[in-house]
Structures are given as structure tokens and as C-alpha cells.
Image (cartoon, helix red, strand yellow):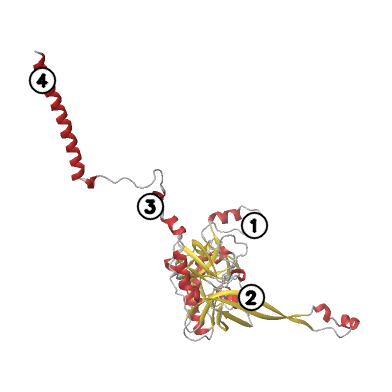
């Protein structure tokens, strides 16, 4: 009785063992047939995540960590960047007090009529824009200089001849005679520049030759009035690349090594902010300077202020205010230059300019740009508000004689 029962138990056990064995075999065969569905395990020491961190590195970190694009940009333009040294001789007259006849009778006639001459030296940067030896720089670098010396990166020096200066846009063109095989800086387009783009400044700041600084474009179309130089007509590229005295006239590059602006150190109090003249503007001015030696700028002859309703209201609620101003948007005329086109047309102090040729004017910068884009001698139809009345005046533009 017991033997048959044992036989059945052995048969059941054998069946279970056989089923388990078949299951193991099927599992192993499945893994061998479908290896592509299984991801390989990471190799290396457990806990070593350096490879994963490198794979997940952000593009910004990679760009900052690699200076190859800066090196390539500088190498592309570096040999075309020059140093400009200037000399100017000035002679100071003796104080008029010493020329008084009574003083001379008392001390004698042996006093000098003038002081010894004095040499003023300046330093700036520039870059070659043509193989014939045309160099672009800032006007304030070479203005009133008696001698201009241009030094190339390879150490060669040449006497420079100023071909033209435009104080209004702070641009100048200098010519050197160094053959026809000079390196030329590739000019880009400032119209393609965007806030956040790389900005590379090259020049000779503070006398440290061949210096490169890196930053970004922090804003565009920063007007000269906002910067604090109302005698200029410019919309600057603003950058946080370091720009110091000596950088003036040097190129501001994009990440591809193309010139997008001309650095100008005009704010000694600026900390971490620099300004550059857009290269599109500079190219147009340089062509005129090379051809004519100067640039004719039309003007109206008014000192102006952007007017808003809030600003006018603040004035009108002040009991000490000498005039009441219309609480509107426009350009407030603070002063009319005598014998100017505006004076001849009848524009008065206190007028608010509302339109020019039917186009609404809401800021002083906008009015300045409209006038700058007009032709010399062009008649502009200017709508002004004077008190409670509006008037239409015809103003014929004339040439601005100097920046002041």
C-alpha cells in the first residue's frame, strides 16, 4: 500500500523539477534571442558619475568652458587691430595780468609774452578696413592731433594722415602708406546683433597693447542722450565687455570674429558698461569721410526734452513753475538757437512738437533721428502746440557746423 503512494510522490516531484528546468531554459533562451531589448549596465567604478555629468553639461557651460571660439575670433581680426599714438603741441599765453603796462613798468619788460610749448600725448585703437591702409577709429582719438602714429601688431609703425573727422558721430578715417597687402578686419552687420550675443572687445586699454575682453551685448539702441552726450547723434550697442581709455576706436566683435561695432570709452564713471558705435552706421560715415573728408548733418536748432503727461503735470502742479505745459506726449522745446532754422521758422521756447511731416513725434530721440535722416535744405512740416492752439510751421533744415 505504501509503495504505490511513494511512486506517485516521486512522479509528482519529477514533474515539478522538469517544469522548473524548462522555465529556466526558456528564460535564458529569451535573453539570448532578444539582446537589443536589454540596456547594458554602466561600466566603471560604482559611484563614478563624472561621465554622466559631462554628458549632461549645458551648452552655456560648454561655451564658457571652451575658449576656442574667442581664440578663433581674435585670430581672425587681431592682426588688423592697430595702436594709434597722437601728439599735439599747445602754447599757453601768459596771464593777461602780467601784460598790464603798470605791472611791466614795475617788474620790467623782460617778462615772456607766452609760456613754453607743451606736448600732449594721446593713445587709442583702430582697425584696418582696406588693404590700401585705411584705418577706422574714433574722432576724439585723432582730433586736433599734430602727429598721428599707427603701430601694427607686428611692430611696424607708420605715420598716419587723417582723411576725415566727424565729431557728431565720433568717427574718423586715417590713411597709412604700408603697401597693399595689409590685414583687413572682416566687417559684419550690426542689424543682426541681438541682446545676449557674445561681444569681444579688442584694443589697447590704458596702454596695455593687444588686450582682449569678453562679455555680451547687454542692450541695443542706447541713445547718446541717455548716455549723457547730447552733442552726438548715435544709438550705441551697450556691452559688459570691459572698455577703458585706450580701447577707443578698437573693434567690438561677434562670436564669429566679425566687427559689429567701434568701441568708445566715453563714460569714465561707467562700471562694467561699455558702448560701441554700430558698424552699419560707421561704414556709411567712413565712405563719406573718405570721399569728402567730412559729413554734412542737417539740424533744426532746438534744445529739447521728451514730454509726457506725467512730466507736464508735475510741472503744472509746482507753484513756482514759470509756465504751464500741455499735458500731452511730444517734444518740449527748451531753447531755440538764435539764427537757426527753427528760429527762422517761428518755433518758440515752450512749444511742444507733435508731428513732423504728418508722423507723430513722442520722444527727443525720435525727432533727432527724423532730422538726421532728412536732406540738407529739405522743408519739414512741423506741427506744434503753443498753449491751447496748434500751429503748422515749415522748417528748412541747414547744415550743422560743429558738434557744439
Q: How far apart are marks 3 and 2 (CA)?
A: 51 Å
Q: Position of residue 320 (x, y in %)?
A: 67, 55
Q: Tell me the SS state at disc 1.
A: loop
In the rendered image of this protein, does residue 111 appear above or below residue 299? below
As drawn, is 387 to the left or to the right of 181?
A: right
Q: Are marks 4 and 1 in contact (CB under 8 Å)?
A: no
Q: Which of marks 4 and 2 is nearer the N terminus?
A: 4
> Which residue in the structure is indicated by mark 2?
122
Q: How far apart are marks 4 and 1 (CA)?
A: 121 Å
Q: Are marks 3 and 2 in contact (CB under 8 Å)?
A: no
**Tag nearer the camera, 3 or 4:** 4
- Residue located 18% across and 41% down the image: 29
Q: Tell me the SS state at disc 4.
A: helix
> Which residue in the structure is indicated by mark 1?
321
Q: Position of residue 101 (x, y in %)?
A: 86, 83
Q: Which of 383 and 58 is in front in this view?
A: 58
Work out whether residue 391 can be spotted.
no
As drawn, is 70 to the left or to the right of 43?
A: right
- Residue located 49% across and 61% down the image: 216
User: Residue 313 sits in which quadrant?
Assistant: bottom right
Q: Earlier in the sequence, mark 1 or mark 3?
A: 3
Q: Mark 2: give few (<14), some (14-19) or many (20+) Cα within 10 Å.
A: some
> Which residue in the structure is indicated by mark 4?
7
> Which residue in the structure is indicated by mark 3?
55
Amino acid at each position: 500500500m505504501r509503495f504505490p503512494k511513494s511512486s506517485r510522490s516521486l512522479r509528482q516531484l519529477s514533474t515539478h523539477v522538469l517544469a522548473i528546468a524548462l522555465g529556466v531554459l526558456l528564460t535564458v533562451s529569451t535573453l539570448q534571442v532578444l539582446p537589443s531589448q536589454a540596456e547594458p549596465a554602466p561600466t566603471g567604478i560604482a559611484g563614478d558619475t563624472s561621465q554622466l555629468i559631462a554628458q549632461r553639461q549645458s551648452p552655456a557651460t560648454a561655451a564658457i568652458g571652451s575658449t576656442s571660439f574667442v581664440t578663433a575670433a581674435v585670430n581672425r581680426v587681431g592682426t588688423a587691430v592697430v595702436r594709434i599714438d597722437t601728439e599735439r603741441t599747445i602754447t599757453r599765453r601768459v596771464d593777461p595780468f602780467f601784460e598790464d603796462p603798470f605791472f611791466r613798468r614795475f617788474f620790467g619788460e623782460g617778462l615772456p609774452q607766452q609760456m613754453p610749448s607743451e606736448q600732449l600725448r594721446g593713445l587709442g585703437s583702430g582697425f584696418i578696413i582696406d588693404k590700401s591702409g585705411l584705418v577706422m577709429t574714433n574722432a576724439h582719438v585723432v582730433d586736433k592731433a599734430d602727429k598721428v602714429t599707427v603701430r601694427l601688431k607686428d611692430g611696424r609703425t607708420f605715420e598716419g594722415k587723417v582723411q576725415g573727422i566727424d565729431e557728431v558721430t565720433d568717427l574718423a578715417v586715417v590713411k597709412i602708406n604700408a603697401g597693399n597687402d595689409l590685414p583687413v578686419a572682416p566687417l559684419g552687420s550690426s542689424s543682426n546683433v541681438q541682446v545676449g550675443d557674445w561681444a569681444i572687445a579688442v584694443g589697447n586699454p590704458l596702454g596695455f597693447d593687444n588686450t582682449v575682453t569678453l562679455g555680451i551685448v547687454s542692450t541695443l539702441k542706447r541713445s547718446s542722450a541717455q548716455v549723457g552726450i547730447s552733442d552726438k547723434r548715435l544709438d550705441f550697442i551697450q556691452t559688459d565687455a570691459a572698455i577703458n581709455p585706450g580701447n577707443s576706436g578698437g573693434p567690438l566683435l561677434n562670436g564669429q570674429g566679425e566687427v559689429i561695432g567701434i568701441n568708445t570709452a566715453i563714460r569714465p564713471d561707467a562700471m562694467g558698461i561699455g558702448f560701441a558705435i554700430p558698424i552699419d552706421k560707421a561704414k556709411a560715415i567712413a565712405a563719406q569721410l573718405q570721399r569728402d573728408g567730412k559729413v554734412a548733418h542737417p539740424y533744426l536748432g532746438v534744445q529739447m526734452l521728451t514730454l509726457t503727461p506725467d512730466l507736464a503735470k508735475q510741472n503744472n502742479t509746482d507753484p513756482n513753475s514759470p509756465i504751464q505745459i500741455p499735458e500731452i506726449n511730444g517734444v518740449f522745446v527748451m531753447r531755440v538757437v538764435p539764427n537757426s532754422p527753427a528760429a527762422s521758422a517761428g518755433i518758440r521756447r515752450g512749444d511742444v512738437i507733435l508731428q513732423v511731416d504728418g508722423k507723430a513725434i513722442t520722444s527727443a530721440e525720435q525727432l533727432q533721428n527724423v532730422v538726421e535722416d532728412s536732406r540738407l535744405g529739405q522743408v519739414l512740416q512741423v506741427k506744434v502746440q503753443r498753449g491751447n492752439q496748434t500751429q503748422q510751421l515749415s522748417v528748412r533744415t541747414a547744415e550743422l557746423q560743429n558738434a557744439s
